[in-house]
Image (spheres, rainbow, N blue to C red):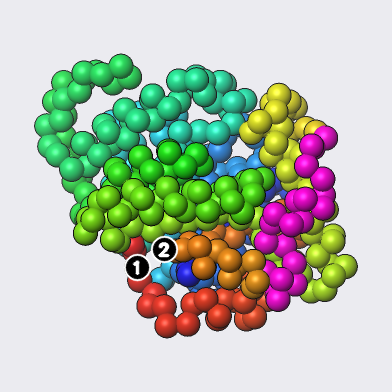
Amino acid sequence: MEFNHFLSSYYPDPRYGAVRLYADMIEQARLAERLGYQSVALPEHHLINILLTPAPLSMAVKVAAETKRVRIVTSVVVLPLHDMRVYAGELVVADALTDGRLILGVGRGAFGYEMDRMGVPLADSRAKFDESLDVLNALLTREEVSWDGRWYTFDPITVMPRPARPIPMMIAALAPEAIYHSVKRGCHIQTTPLMGTREHMLEQVDAFRRGRDELGAAGRHLELSLLRVAYVARDEADKKAKVAMAFDYYKRFDNVFTGPGIVNHGAIEPLPRKQTIEELERNLLIGTAAEVENKLAEYAEAGIDETILNMNIGCGQAETLASMERFAATVMPRFTAGLRVASAR
């Protein structure tokens, strides 16, 4: 199993400032490479202070300039918010400037507050995502592409410059059937059980396997990534403190993901949660090194190819870096022994 460090840009106090926020993410990317993480991941979100990277391709180019080996994954670009005729060219440039280390992770969008204000309500986002992905693939693989669809209508165009290589794509999907159909497109998959049970996670894995197996030889290279909030604690007291931080993080996440979307001046209001803090602790990868290792062993046994670790849960930069180091020193070696570091999937 491989490991990906999520440059998740959590921004609970806007007074911290964008310069410091993104400098922290770049420092984490450099450390991730030194410690042997195979990848780093970049989100895309707008107008809110969770997962705040409004320009992930720009961030990817900066990460590439500061590193030499680590793969750079968008996790994920919200395709319905972009015009594919523009985005295809931006993607080609970013791939060239990231030395072929870019993996394009894409999704339909998840936060109603953000999507409504960007002009693509969640009710429309699935249909627009599907057409956008088809248009993007056409523009990247063919010349003189024309289109006559619901969301796009245009005369023949050729995106310039042309891609230097086929850019690997990963689709974010949660529901098992969405995972299955996304695999059938020939794409890698990112998923997460969120607050779901282990059984739900196994259903997600099974859907991935079904789709991959039905593709036969064409699907053998496809990989399944699992996103998890994680932290390797110094001791039991540190673990409890970080679980409390994660609980506060999810008060905000739930507000925009499944809740009413109450946001003031870009800051998401923390709202009461139905899940207890004890239930959350059992669900996440927060614990001592031995506890995190035991939970990851279940993922490896289930067939997860890569775990994306979100360690930015509200603690300071020094503590996040220390957790990254503890993970690399005490947990990672059990799962990565013999892995060959590659420049891209």
Q: For the residue labelled by badge 2, is the local secondary structure a helix, a strand or a loop? A: strand
Q: Front-most of 130 and 84?
A: 130
As drawn, 66 above or below 86: below
Instruction: Find residue 160 and report its image quarter.
Output: top left
Does the stretch in magenta take in 57?
Answer: no
Q: Earlier in the sequence, mark 2 or mark 1?
A: 2
Marks counted in the figure total 2
The residue located at (80%, 33%) in the rendering is 271
Q: Is residue 231 above or below residue 234?
A: above
Q: Position of residue 45 (x, y in %)?
A: 56, 38
Left or right of residue 114, residue 315 in this image: right
The mark found on residue 45 in the picture is none
Q: Considering the image in quadrants, where does the C terminus appear? A: bottom left
Image: magenta residue range:
272-292
Tag 1's secondary structure? loop
Q: Quadrant of residue 321?
A: bottom right
Instruction: Give yes or no for contact between labels 2 and 1 (Cβ–Cβ under 8 Å).
Output: yes
Give coordinates of residue 300: x percent, y percent. Answer: 52, 68
Q: Which residue in the protein does label 2 denote?
A: 71
The amino acid sitting under disc 2 is: Arg
**Residue 69 in the image, given as x and y percentages of width and height:** 41, 71
Tell me if residue 93 can be seen.
no
**Residue at position x 47%, y 82% in the image:** 337
Q: Residues within 10 Å of mark 1 (few under 14, many from 20)?
A: some
Say what amino acid the circle numbered 1 marks. Answer: Ser
Decide: is 53 above or below 111: below
Let me know if residue 283 appears in the view: yes
Residue under numbered circle 1: 343
- Please name whichever residue, 249 or 102, is drawn nearer the observer in this view of the structure: 249
Left or right of 83: which side holds 248?
Answer: right
**What x and y, as percent, mark residue 253?**
69, 39
Q: Residues within 10 Å of mark 2 (few under 14, many from 20)?
A: many
